[in-house]
Image (cartoon, grey):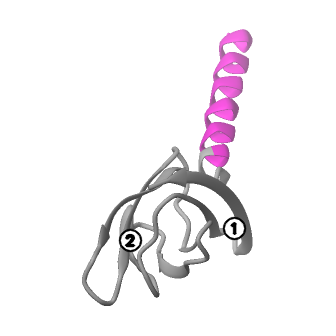
């Protein structure tokens, strides 16, 4: 009987720790890329991205810089997975995307910055 209570206590503790881990794990931004561009003024680039499992960010800042010097920035809600990024002009070739995600874990802010390269 004591062994059964002990096993139940261990199982409950493991379940509790799993729930705590899931709540504190930040969902990483994955597979961010430029999918399309609008030719009409003002120029815009369509961005798409996914999230890994975990808590989504409160906000997301995405900075794009192309090798031709075209740059733009976008701030959006953490639940979005698609957005149009305003640009001063269209670009072709390689680009770098800098993503800054802001999370709130148990009342404390946590910022994670990632970089990704691509070509359009």
Q: Is residue 16 magenta?
A: yes
120 left or right of 14 in image: left
- Residue 59 in which image quadrant: bottom right
Front one among 7 and 50: 50
Q: In the rendered image of this protein, does residue 36 appear above or below residue 44?
A: above
Q: Residues within 10 Å of mark 2 (few under 14, many from 20)?
A: many
Residue 16 position within the rendered picture, expressed as x and y whole percent measured from the top left? 64, 40
Label 1's element? loop
- Residue 55 in which image quadrant: bottom right
Residue 63 position within the rendered picture, expressed as x and y whole percent measured from the top left? 59, 74
In the picture, the quarter occupied by the C terminus is bottom left
Q: In the rendered image of this protein, does residue 23 appear above or below residue 110?
A: above
Q: Residues within 10 Å of mark 1 (few under 14, many from 20)?
A: few
Read off the magenta span.
1-21
Front one among 111 and 118: 118
Tell me, for residue 45, which label it has, or none. 2
Front one among 113 and 23: 113
Residue 109 position within the rendered picture, expressed as x and y whole percent measured from the top left? 72, 74
6 left or right of 85 in image: right
Q: Which residue is mark 1?
A: 106
The answer to whether residue 25 of the structure is visible from this angle is yes
Residue at image point 50% right, 52% down: 119
């Amino acid at each position: 009987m004591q062994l059964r209570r002990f096993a139940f206590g261990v199982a409950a503790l493991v379940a509790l720790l799993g729930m705590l881990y899931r709540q504190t794990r930040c969902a990483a931004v994955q597979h961010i890329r430029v999918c399309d561009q609008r030719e009409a003024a003002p120029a815009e680039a369509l961005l798409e991205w996914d999230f890994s499992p975990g808590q989504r960010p409160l906000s997301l800042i995405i900075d794009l810089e192309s090798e031709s010097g075209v740059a733009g920035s976008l701030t959006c809600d953490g639940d979005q997975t698609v957005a149009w990024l305003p640009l001063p002009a269209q670009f072709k070739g390689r680009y770098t995307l800098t993503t800054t995600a802001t999370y709130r874990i148990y009342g404390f802010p946590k910022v994670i910055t990632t970089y990704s390269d691509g070509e359009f």
